[in-house]
Amino acid sequence: MATLRSGKQVDGSDGGGSGGEVDGRDRGAVQDADIKEKRNARTSKVVFGSLILDLLGFTVVLPLFPALLDYYSKHDSSGLYSSLLSSVTYYQHIIGVPARFHSVLFGGLLGSLFSLLQFLFSPITGALSDVYGRKPVFICTLIGVAASYGLWAAASNFAMFVMARIVGGAVKGNVSLAYSIMTDVSDEKTRARGMALIGVAFSIGFTIGPTVGAAFSRWGSTGWFAASAVYALTLAVANIIFFAVFFQESLPEGRRRRDIGASLNEAWELINPRALFSFSSVKGLGREERTKLIQLSRVYFLYLFLYSGLEFTLTFVTHHKHSYDSLAQGRMFSFLGLVMALTQGGFMRSVKTGTEKATANKGLMMMIPAFILIGASETNLGLYSGLTLYAIGSSMMVPCLTALASCHGAASHKGTLLGIWRSLGALARAFGPVVTSIGFWVMGAEVCYIVGGLSMLLPLVMLQAY
């Protein structure tokens, strides 16, 4: 009897016993999938909120840079500014550089230093998160960001402000970790949606952050804008609490790496320029495909090298040529952020697969007159005409070049390829500001931006060979 009953249960001839069990298992699997999807969606929203808080604080300093450096040129008890000044005075007299351009040169040095530290430390941050989990490492980066704002708030001298920027650059790995988290909680079908959320967070941060930061700069009497720094610090502390309370670990222990040495070795591949430009970590590429990818990466690097330098010195152009104060700078950044958001949310969503190269060509062709107009114009109309072309063109470039790069390699190596791609961009941003600032210091805004705009012809020509 027992055997017969067992047989009935196996073949399901009793009319529903095993069918009910199968249906139950199916319902359970569906419920588990729904729970997982909701948990992943919640995680994406938490990362999105954290990035907005972070970027609202990060962008505070952007419209304040020229005024900050002007202040430290006259009030620096540490002696660091005067020491740097003495090292360039000899060349200043030979070339005939106006003294008011020194702040541009020192600003470029600080901008490149920040980006270089971010380039060096972000892969290490990612490697540590692969072993110890995303949440603890992410929180450590947020604490470091808060510490950098605390240093800025107390930065009555230039040396302390430089230290604040050094700390900020070294710990700014939370953005790269956000990409890793989105990869944890998505698959090939939903990954684009998660990455788009990061782009939206950047648009919101760069549209609102500079204006609010500039408004806070009007409070208090300190020349180093302590009120703006305290505002950024408040956002950073709120971010720590928000992330610690609401984020659930996206990398369970079973999926973590056990060997910290191997993880750090992979991180080295992301800061080794030779390995980056050869894509040596990406396996399975044919010779022709690797050659095309290397060609595309050179276009991407050169474009971002030129773009990042001109982008960084934009506030100095408007400060020196148009006498923009921090509020006018903030309004300018808000305008740029709004145009970029409209372009990315409107036109770029309609770009069809296979047209990325043509769209990138259009973006590059816009950048040439954009920078020439920004540098040469004497009126707000000419300046904002250039800014509009700049915002539209730059919104088209990086997404299209990244999409072209993502077409290469097997699906299993996409993460490695795009990690190298982001590191190439970070490396370009590490050198662009200082080189362009030297050009600005030597040639002035007009010639520097005209040369920079015409230099965009180089990546445009190189892209045609891809």
Image (cartoon, rainbow, N blue to C red):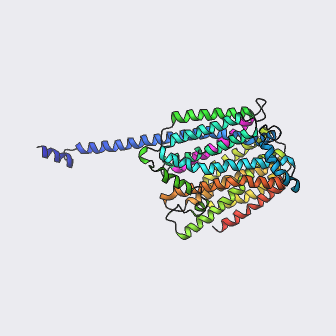
Residue at screen point 84% across, 45% down: 322
Quadrant for the N terminus, please. top left
Residue at screen point 60% across, 65% down: 294
The x and y percentages for residue 333 are: 73, 43
Question: Which residue is nearer to you in this view: 64 or 97?
Answer: 97
**Vertical side of 191 occupied by 154: above or below:** above
Q: Is residue 196 magenta?
A: yes
| Residue 106 visible | yes
The x and y percentages for residue 197 are: 57, 45
- Is residue 104 shown left or right of residue 231? right
Q: How many marks?
A: 0
Q: Main SS of the magenta segment?
A: helix
In the orientation shown, which residue stands out farthest toward the bottom?
Answer: 288
Q: Which residues are magenta?
A: 191-214
**Vertical side of 96 occupied by 145: above or below:** above
- Is residue 72 shown left or right of residue 353? right
Q: Is residue 229 magenta?
A: no
Question: Which residue is nearer to you in this view: 334 or 415?
Answer: 415
Quadrant for the C terminus, please. bottom right
* Image quadrant where residue 142 sits: top right
- Is residue 236 shown left or right of residue 377? left
- Is residue 36 shown left or right of residue 107? left
In the orientation shown, which residue stands out farthest toward the left?
Answer: 1
Question: Which residue is nearer to you in this view: 222 or 425?
Answer: 222
| Residue 193 visible | no
The x and y percentages for residue 430 are: 68, 53
